[in-house]
Amino acid sequence: MGVLTVPDLRNKKIDTLLTDYPFAETFLVNNGIDPEKFRDSSMEDYFRQLDPEHMEDHAIDPDHLLTQFADFVNQMLSFLGEDNKIVESITILPGHDKSGNPENFTEFVIRKNEIVSIVGPTGSGKSRLLGDIEWAAQNDTPTGRSILINKKTPDKKWRYSSSEKLVAQLSQNMNFVMDLSVFEFLELHAESRMITDRETVIKRIIKEANNLAGEKFDPDTPITALSGGQSRALMIADTAILSRSPIILIDEIENAGIDRKKALKLLLAEEKIVLMATHDPVLALMGNRRIVIKNGGIDKVIETTEEEKEILSEIEELDRKVQNMREKLRNGEKLTSE
Amino acid sequence: MNLVTVSGPPSVGKTSVILKTIVSLKERKLKVGVVKFDCLFTDDDILYEKAGVMVQKGLSGGLCPDHYFVSNIEEVTQWGLDNKFDILISESAGLCNRCSPYIKDIKAVCVIDNLSGIGTPKKIGPMLKSADIVIITKGDIVSQAEREVFASRVHSVNPGATILHVNGLTGQGSFELSTLLYDKDEDITTLKGKTLRFSMPAALCSYCLGETRIGESYQMGNVRKIDLGKREI
Ligand SMILES: Nc1nc2c(ncn2[C@@H]2O[C@H](COP(=O)(O)OP(=O)(O)OP(=O)(O)O)[C@@H](O)[C@H]2O)c(=O)[nH]1
Ligand SMILES: Nc1ncnc2c1ncn2[C@@H]1O[C@H](COP(=O)(O)OP(=O)(O)O)[C@@H](O)[C@H]1O
Ligand SMILES: [Mg+2]
Ligand SMILES: [Mg+2]
Ligand SMILES: [Zn+2]
Ligand SMILES: [Zn+2]
């Protein structure tokens, strides 16, 4: 199937279009055209039967709509034709700090299945670094850095495509705003990602989310009724499994009753690159390496040492104790000093 | 001078996004001015002034602000030229979903927020469907999944647009937006002779009757003129 042209679109039966391009239904529905009603018509027939007054009221411009329809189909075709696991590595090439001093490294490569944390005081430039990566900077941001993907200058699509973003971000906020059940919500997301076997994927997300959250929830629970920990768990499982973006940014996963270690494991199991801006020792030390930012520049990169890994085990032990106490308090028990 | 029209439903974050973007434009030593169009009331001019940005405001009263916009945009453009702006940004609150202030060959930006619900992109007319750039705000309040679903809905009603996520509070994404707004090869000296991307119905003035050409000679009926104060050069 080659590129779809406007004349093709104009004259083919909508039924034929939907057979060739099932995803076209989304376009029709969102532009107020009922695909069932017009199955046997072409777009041309559809426009012809429209009342001119209706067209005026709803600002329908047939040529504009057909051009957009063709754009939509062609973008979807190229989107579906691509392998989404194509990002093996990202490379940061040095720029300069806020005073214009060059950054002191030749290149910094991050590979998939890797966690890197980013530390530095407020205002030092952590978000700017994450921004450089997300925008695939080419010496055209305030830092002068450049980003390579798989060691090559990246395709512009990473900047401008709405369906292929380099970066997915776990929000600070832990609440959902949509008024849907867990299942409906995931179905909607899966649909927007053009997933065909939705049922299986949704079941898997719910299973993983329940694995992360303390208290289990079922598919019929309204997402707005989930607890903070459950929402967080669902967000992480959903992002790990359904988001196509190869890089996940985390601006601090709060201590909201989820198993953070498991959460990171899940993200890595889905072949993601994880970048975390955090000062929480448990998270910062979970990275294999951490980038230290000072005055807008990458000051140094520290490999997590063996000693730090031992310290991490100690902190995790403490963390577990605190979590246990929280659980006991929640269940109305008394704390005892064993 | 470059002219950029920014439009979007009330309170989505237009002013916040414009202010953050102006910071990046100013870093490139560009002189920026703003004009705000609204219906009955706005405080936005105070916000722009506080940020040291030259601003004019026009209130349409009972008229559709988009009709009022098209009756005044040529005069505002001349005000911008008089003040030697490199870039003039117009902000208008899209109150009626039918009209939109976009002009052919003038960069059109539509701002909407993640909170407005996934049915919203379908409901907004030409203001969203014919924009060149769509900015989605308030991503900090929703989940990654909700952002992705919302962006895909926007994409399905305007597949040709560049869709960017910008946070009006932190400015995340505003530098990126600033790179799309200014083009040094573009130079507007008048809008006379240019046309709207979509006609505006609802009979109040010549534009209500389908007029799309800009300039005093095409304006008939109930036309109100913006007060730009004394012209200072
Ligand atoms: N959480 C959050 N709040 C935002 C964001 N952008 C804007 N806001 C807030 O939303 C409110 C409205 O923002 P404005 O920038 O005044 O919106 P506007 O579209 O210019 O509003 P009108 O000009 O009155 O139509 C303010 O309280 C902003 O602080 C964002 O990205 N996230
Ligand atoms: N190398 C740099 N050169 C110039 N400006 C920079 C540089 N790095 C960061 N900035 C600017 O400094 C400000 C603060 O950076 P930000 O990334 O928000 O800090 P953080 O996230 O660490 O609090 C931002 O306006 C950012 O654009
Ligand atoms: Mg920050
Ligand atoms: Mg405003
Ligand atoms: Zn109107
Ligand atoms: Zn009018």
Image (tube, helix red, strand yellow):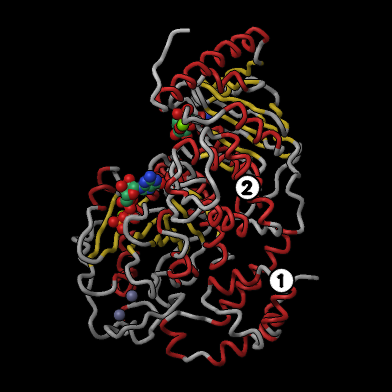
Callouts 2 and 1 on one subunit: yes
Question: Based on the displayed image, in which of its 4 quarters is residue B34 positioned?
Answer: bottom left
Percent of width and height locating residue A78: 73, 60
| Image point (63%, 26%), residue name | A116
For the question of whether residue B194 can be seen, the reply is: no
Residue for badge 1: A21
> On what subunit does the disc labeled 1 rest?
A
The answer as to whether callout 1 falls within 8 Å of ligand 5 is no
The answer to whether residue A238 shows anywhere in this view is yes
The image position of residue A123, as x and y in percent, is 43, 27
Q: Which residue is mark 2?
A: A243
* Element class at badge 1: loop
For label 2, the SS is: loop
Query: Which quadrant of the view contains residue A59?
Result: bottom left
Choose between B205 and B142: the one closer to the eye. B142
Mark 2, Cα crowd under 10 Å, few <14 / some 14-19 / many 20+, is many
